[in-house]
C-alpha cells in the first residue's frame, strides 16, 4: 500500500508556514471575536462535590445592571434539551449495557463534582455576567462524597446516580482468562505490582471558549469554538437543535491554542451557551478562566491497577493478568468509556510476544471532574503497567533491564496480540540498540560512580512503548462499541493560475498541518509550497471529516495524497491532448507531463489552465475543471513504537530528582517533517516527565474538593527541570496508509513516565514508587534506604 514520496519537500525539515502569523500575534482565536450584539456568559458553579439542588434564587441577579437572561437546568428540561451523550457503548462481563448517569448541560437534581455548572447568566459584558452569577443564591442540600474508586465500589458508599449500584458504570473484560490462568499455572516465575497512574489536569495555552450566533429568522446557528473536531460538533449540535440541513449549522474552530485531547469532548458549558444564544436570539460568548479549566476541563489518567506477569525459567513472558479500577469522575465523559477499555487494555502486551493475556476494567463514578482523553489516552496507562512490571521481573530474575526486553520482543510482523490488535510493522530490537547507543549505556557504571562521588544517587531506566494511532478502520471501531466513522476526507482544488487549495477534515491545534499537508501536495505535484493553501476548521467549507486526535494526521494526509493522484490521473488525460499522444504514454514527474512519443512537455500549471479553459480537449470525454475529493478509511491502526533511556540523579538530602539525560529512539514510520516531529517528541517527553515527577490532581478525600486547582499547587513542568533530549528515528514504514506514516503526537508522553520511574526505582533499589515522585516522597525513601 505504501507509495514512496521522493520529492524535495516531503520528509525534509521545512519551517512551519503558519508560524509567521502566529508568532506576530496575528492568530485568530475564539475569544478575539466580537460579533454584532455580542453578549457574554458566566456560570454559577457548585461549591460542593455532591449536593442536591433545592432551590435557585436569581431574583437579586435579575435586577443587576446588564443582565439579559438567567438560565437554569429546569429551563433546559422545560425545552426538552437532551443530556450530553456517551458515545461508546460497552457491555459488562455479564452482558449488561454500560450504566451511564444522566448529565445535563446544567445540573438539575444534583451536582456531582465541585465546579459543575448549575446556572448560567447572560449579560451585556463579561464583568456584569460574573457579578450577577455571584449574586445568585443556590440552596444546596450537601450529600456525602467519595473521591476514591475503591471506596466508591464499597457497599454503603455514597451513591452518585439513581439505579447504578456501587457506582459501577461497567465491569468489562478482554482476553482469554482461562488461557492466561493456564499460563500462570505452568510458570516458573511470577511477579506482581500494584500501581497508581496519577490523575492529570490538561493545561492548554488557550482555555476553552465558545461564541454562538443564532439567526432566528433564518433558523441558522454559527458556533465558533475551541475544538479538535468541528465537524463532529456540527453533527452533535445538529441533533440537539434539530438543524438537519448542514447549511443551517456552521461550526468554526479557527486557531486553537493546544488540545491534547481535552478539546475533543462535548462539554456542559458549550451546550448551555448554545442553548442560551438561541433563547435570547443574540450572540453569546464564554471563555473559561484558568480556575474553571482546572475544575472542569476533562482530566486524564487516574487508574489503580494490579498486574501479574508469568515467566518461564529463562525469563520469557508466558502470561499477563491485569485488573484496573478506572476513575470516571462524576459522569461518563464523551470518550470516557473508550479510554480505559479499548484504548488502554488492548495495548497492555506492549512490545512483547506474550501468548496469553487477560484484563478486567471496572469503570467507577466518583465525585471528581469527569475523565476523558489526555495526550495518549489510555496508551500511556498501558505502557506504564507493562514497563513497570517488566522492570520488577528483571530485578527478581537478576537480568539486565535491556536484556529482559530483548529476550521477549516481538520479531515478526504483522503480529496478532491476544488483545484484539494486529501490529502492522516494527523493528523493536533496532530501536533498543539505537537508544542504548545514544545513551552510552555500556558506560553507565562510570557515570554512576561519578554521582556517588558527589554524594548523589544515580539510576537508569528503560522503557519500550508501542501505541495504536491513526484510528481506523470504521468497521473495527463500530465492532468495538463506537459509531464507526473513522475515515478522513480531503478535497484538492487546482485553480486556473496554478494555485492549489487543500480542504481537509483534519484539524490542527498546534501540530503544523498547514506545513506538512502542503509538503505532501508540493511533492506530488512538483510545485512550490507557496502555491498551496491548506484550509480547515470551517464546516461551511469542509463538509466531511473527523478532526484530529490519536495522531490522525496520517489518515488525513493519505486522503490528500489520494486526491492528488486523482488530479494527476486527469492531468494525464488532458496533457495527452496537449501533446497529441495516446494517454497511456503520458508520464508525470516533478511537475512535468511528458511522453516518449514526442519531445514536447506540459508543465503542471499549463495543464491546470487547460483544464479550466476546456478548449483543448473534448468536454464530452473529460469534464472541465480540476477538483478531486477522496475519503480514506485506513485498513488498520498504525503502531508507532520506540525505546527510551532515562538517567536521573537524586539528592538524598532533599529528595529532588533531576533528569540528567533522556534519549529516545522512535519508529514513526515515514516522517513528513523531522523538525516538526522532533518538536512533538520534545513536548510529549516533557509532559511525561511532568507526570512522573510533579503533576497530580489531588482531591481531598473528605470533601472531594480539588486542592491542586491552580499553578500555585499543581506541578507544571518547567524548562529548568528538563534536560536536552537526544533523539533518533528508526523507520519501518506502515502498510496501513499510502504514505507509510505511523504518527508521533503521543509517543513522548507514553514512553517517558515509565522510563523516569524505572530510573528512580533503579537508583533507590526499590520495586516501585507511585507517580509523581515528589521530593517529599523520595526524601522519605532515601531515609529508609539510609537506615537499612
Image (cartoon, rainbow, N blue to C red):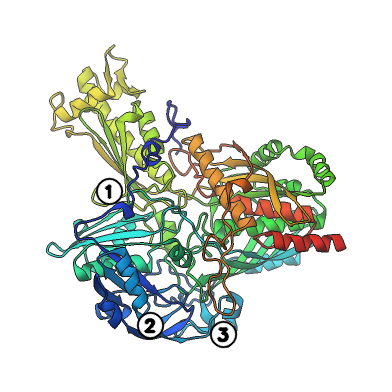
Q: Are marks 3 and 1 in contact (CB under 8 Å)?
A: no
Give percent across and percent down for residue 612: 17, 30
Mark found first going from the N terminus, 2 or 1? 2
Residue hosting label 1:
542
Q: CA distance from mark 2 to mark 1?
A: 43 Å
Mark found first going from the N terminus, 3 or 1? 3
Task: In the rendered structure, find residue 138 and report the number of the disc placed on it.
Answer: 2
Quadrant in the picture for residue 421: bottom right
Is residue 466 rendered to the left or right of residue 333? right
Q: Give whichever of 78, 325 is nearer the camera.
A: 78
Task: In the rendered structure, find residue 157 and report the number of the disc placed on it.
Answer: 3
* Residue 645 visible, this angle: yes
Bin the neighbour count of mark 3 within 10 Å (Cα to Cα): few under 14, some 14-19, many 20 and up: some
In this rendering, the label closer to the viewer, 2 or 1? 2
Give percent across and percent down for residue 332: 45, 71
Helix, strand or loop under label 1: loop
- Residue at the spot x=55%, y=48% of the render? 684
Mark found first going from the N terminus, 2 or 3? 2
In this rendering, the label closer to the viewer, 3 or 1? 3
Q: CA distance from mark 3 to mark 1?
A: 49 Å
Bin the neighbour count of mark 1 within 10 Å (Cα to Cα): few under 14, some 14-19, many 20 and up: many
Where, quadrant-wise, is the N terminus in this rendering?
A: top left
- Residue at the spot x=26%, y=61% of the render? 212
Give percent across and percent down for residue 723: 64, 43
Amino acid at each position: 500500500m505504501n507509495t514512496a514520496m521522493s520529492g524535495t519537500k516531503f520528509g525534509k525539515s521545512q519551517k512551519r508556514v503558519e508560524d509567521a502569523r502566529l508568532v506576530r500575534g496575528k492568530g485568530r482565536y475564539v475569544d478575539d471575536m466580537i460579533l454584532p450584539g455580542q453578549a457574554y456568559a458566566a456560570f454559577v458553579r457548585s461549591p460542593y462535590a455532591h449536593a442536591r439542588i433545592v432551590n435557585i434564587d436569581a431574583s437579586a441577579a435579575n435586577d443587576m445592571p446588564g443582565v439579559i437572561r438567567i438560565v437554569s437546568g429546569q429551563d433546559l428540561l422545560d425545552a426538552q434539551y437532551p443530556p450530553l451523550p456517551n458515545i461508546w457503548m460497552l457491555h459488562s462481563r455479564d452482558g449488561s449495557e454500560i450504566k451511564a448517569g444522566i448529565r445535563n448541560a446544567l445540573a438539575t437534581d444534583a451536582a456531582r463534582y465541585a465546579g459543575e455548572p448549575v446556572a448560567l447568566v447572560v449579560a451585556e459584558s463579561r464583568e456584569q455576567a460574573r457579578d450577577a452569577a455571584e449574586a445568585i443564591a443556590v440552596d444546596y442540600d450537601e450529600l456525602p462524597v467519595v473521591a476514591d474508586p475503591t471506596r466508591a465500589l464499597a457497599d454503603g458508599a455514597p451513591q452518585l446516580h439513581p439505579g447504578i449500584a456501587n457506582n459501577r458504570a461497567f465491569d468489562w473484560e478482554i482476553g482469554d482468562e482461562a488461557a492466561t490462568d493456564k499460563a500462570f499455572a505452568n510458570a516458573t516465575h511470577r511477579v506482581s505490582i500494584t500501581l497508581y497512574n496519577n490523575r492529570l489536569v490538561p493545561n492548554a495555552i488557550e482555555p476553552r471558549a465558545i461564541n454562538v450566533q443564532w439567526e432566528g429568522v433564518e433558523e441558522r446557528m454559527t458556533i465558533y469554538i475551541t475544538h479538535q473536531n468541528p465537524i463532529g460538533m456540527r453533527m452533535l449540535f445538529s441533533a440537539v437543535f434539530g438543524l438537519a440541513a448542514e447549511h443551517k449549522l456552521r461550526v468554526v474552530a479557527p486557531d486553537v491554542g493546544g488540545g491534547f485531547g481535552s478539546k475533543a469532548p462535548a462539554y456542559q458549558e458549550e451546550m448551555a451557551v448554545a442553548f442560551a444564544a438561541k433563547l435570547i436570539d443574540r450572540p453569546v460568548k464564554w471563555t473559561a478562566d484558568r480556575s474553571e479549566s482546572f475544575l472542569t476541563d476533562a482530566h486524564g489518567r487516574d487508574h489503580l491497577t494490579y498486574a501479574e506477569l508469568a515467566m518461564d525459567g529463562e525469563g520469557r513472558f508466558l502470561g499477563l493478568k491485569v485488573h484496573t479500577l478506572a476513575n470516571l469522575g462524576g459522569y461518563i465523559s464523551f470518550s470516557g468509556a473508550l479510554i480505559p477499555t479499548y484504548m488502554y487494555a488492548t495495548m497492555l502486551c506492549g512490545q512483547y510476544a506474550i501468548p496469553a493475556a487477560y484484563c478486567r476494567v471496572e469503570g467507577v463514578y466518583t465525585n471528581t471532574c469527569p475523565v476523558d482523553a489526555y495526550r495518549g489516552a489510555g496508551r500511556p496507562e498501558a505502557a506504564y503497567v507493562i514497563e513497570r512490571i517488566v522492570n520488577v521481573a528483571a530485578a527478581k530474575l537478576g537480568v539486565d533491564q535491556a536484556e529482559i526486553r530483548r529476550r521477549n520482543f516481538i520479531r515478526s510482523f504483522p503480529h496478532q496480540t491476544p488483545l484484539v490488535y494486529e501490529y502492522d510493522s516494527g523493528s523493536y530490537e533496532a530501536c533498543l540498540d539505537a537508544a542504548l547507543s545514544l545513551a552510552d549505556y555500556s558506560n553507565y557504571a562510570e557515570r554512576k560512580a561519578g554521582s556517588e562521588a558527589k554524594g548523589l544517587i544515580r539510576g537508569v531506566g528503560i522503557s519500550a512503548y508501542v501505541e495504536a494511532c491513526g484510528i481506523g478502520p470504521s468497521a473495527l471501531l463500530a465492532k468495538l462499541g463506537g459509531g464507526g466513522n473513522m475515515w478522513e476526507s480531503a478535497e484538492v482544488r487546482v485553480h486556473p493560475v496554478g494555485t492549489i487549495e487543500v480542504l481537509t477534515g483534519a484539524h490542527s491545534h498546534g501540530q503544523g498541518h498547514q506545513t506538512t499537508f502542503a509538503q505532501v501536495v508540493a511533492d506530488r505535484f512538483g510545485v512550490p509550497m507557496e502555491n498551496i493553501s491548506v484550509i480547515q476548521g470551517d464546516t461551511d467549507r469542509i463538509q466531511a471529516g473527523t478532526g484530529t486526535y490519536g495522531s490522525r494526521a496520517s489518515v488525513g494526509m493519505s486522503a490528500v495524497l489520494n486526491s492528488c493522484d486523482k488530479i494527476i490521473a486527469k492531468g494525464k488525460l488532458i496533457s495527452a491532448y496537449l501533446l497529441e499522444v495516446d494517454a497511456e504514454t503520458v508520464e508525470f514527474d516533478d511537475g512535468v507531463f511528458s511522453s516518449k512519443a514526442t519531445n514536447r512537455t506540459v508543465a503542471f500549471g499549463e495543464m491546470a489552465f487547460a483544464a479550466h479553459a476546456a478548449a483543448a480537449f473534448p468536454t464530452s470525454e473529460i469534464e472541465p475543471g480540476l477538483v478531486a475529493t477522496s475519503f480514506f478509511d485506513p485498513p488498520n491502526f498504525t503502531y508507532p513504537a520506540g525505546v527510551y533511556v532515562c538517567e536521573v540523579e537524586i539528592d538524598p538530602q532533599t529528595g529532588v530528582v533531576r533528569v540528567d539525560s533522556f534519549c529516545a529512539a522512535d519508529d514513526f514510520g515515514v516522517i513528513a517533517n523531522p523538525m516538526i516531529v522532533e518538536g512533538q517528541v520534545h513536548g510529549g517527553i516533557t509532559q511525561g516527565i511532568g507526570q512522573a515527577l510533579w503533576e497530580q490532581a489531588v482531591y481531598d478525600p473528605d470533601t472531594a474538593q480539588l486542592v491542586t486547582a491552580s499553578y500555585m499547587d499543581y506541578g507544571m513542568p518547567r524548562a529548568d527541570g528538563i534536560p536536552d533530549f537526544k533523539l533518533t528515528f528508526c523507520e519501518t514504514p506502515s502498510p496501513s496508509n499510502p504514505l507509510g506514516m505511523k504518527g508521533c503526537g503521543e509517543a513522548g508522553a507514553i514512553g517517558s513516565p515509565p522510563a523516569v520511574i524505572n530510573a528512580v526505582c533503579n537508583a533507590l533499589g526499590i520495586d516501585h514508587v507511585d507517580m509523581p515522585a515528589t521530593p517529599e516522597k523520595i526524601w522519605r525513601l532515601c531515609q529508609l534506604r539510609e537506615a537499612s
